[in-house]
Amino acid sequence: MEYTWGIPGPTFLTIYAILLVFPVVAGLVWTIAAKLGTRTPSAEVSGPQPTVYEFAYLAGGSDRVVDTAIAALVDRGTLRVSSAKQLQLTGPEPADPIEKAVAKSARPGHNATTRGIRDRLRLSGPMQALAKDLEGRGLVVVDQGPRIRRVVYFLYLAVLVFGVVRLIAGLAGDRPVGFLIPMLIAAGGATLIARALKNKRPGPRPTAEGNRVLHKARSAHGRERKRGIPNGPGYVGGAVLGGAAAAVAFGGLASYPDEELSAALIPPQVSSGFGGGSSGGGSSCSSGGSSCSSGGSSCSSGGSSCGGGGGCGG
């Protein structure tokens, strides 16, 4: 009896089962290796002390940087918030690169809400320059997660295509493919989940030293607030730790000194479609697994014809 591609069905199914788990195992090992590789002994930060925008990046990433710049510009009167929660430029463009980018985004014709400005500035030149400087000083490390997730997705896509080609070849050769179909369903589900996961937003994360520096500055800022001058100037190592900008850098827009402006600046909550999708995808994968199981038993019920055909893997 001549098998499809010269590989018996049961043998191919074993190979395909290994291929189904390989991408996730490889991704897990790669993730662990990347995390272990970034663990370095704590050392004093090199270069100047972080600015308020660098502290904001350490505390909450690029979105927190945008929020901090908005707070600084609103506090200085360079920006104002309209009744429609749109930010409007009311003064000259500032010189600071981050503030300048925020001010340009508040011009007419743009979606000048807090969320709209965040979306435009996440991967902007000034934001990438800020992150690169922090990385060079050992305060943040590039997150390998997005790259790992992309590789896992393409691996699963290749596994799915490989299985579909085998299915077509098996059908063309009039071979039984009962066991292969539920495995293809599982591969398809895994590919969809991996595709959703790969779209997670990338971004550097603080190192142990970055967290240490942030904690020190946040504590100093807290002491300033307890002294009864929450918006007064405070300094540590030359970095300003007072004012509305510092309050937002360490605590987010909810910490903006003016409650009415704080409520106007905070974007409305949106349901986390990604989280729901991830959860749904997981159950989809499980159902795929149970389909595989039920498919196996149905194929088993026709065991004599399946066995005579050299397996259900085509």
Image: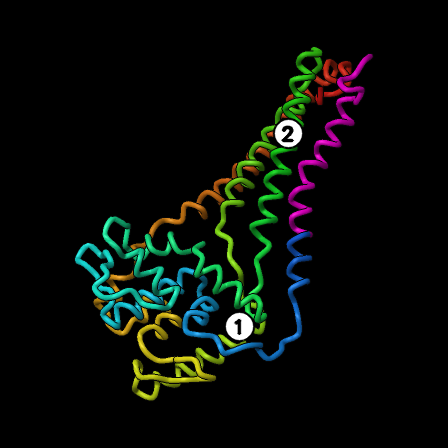
Comparing 72 with 206, the one in front is 72
| Magenta stretch, overall SS | helix
Comparing 72 with 246, the one in front is 72
Comparing 157 with 182, the one in front is 157
Residue pictured at 72% horizontal, 37% vertical? 18
Q: Amino acid at mark 2?
A: Met
Of badges 1 and 2, the one in the foreground is: 1
Q: Is residue 154 left or right of residue 245?
A: right
Residue pictured at 45% horizontal, 62% vertical? 61
Establish if 278 lies above or below 302.
below
Q: Amino acid at mark 1?
A: Asn
Residue identifier under label 2: 183
Residue identifier under label 1: 211
Asked which secondary structure carries label 1, the reply is: helix
Establish if 81 lies above or below 279.
below
Establish if 246 lies above or below 281.
below
* Magenta span of residues: 1-29
Give the percent coordinates (x, y) of residue 288.
57, 33
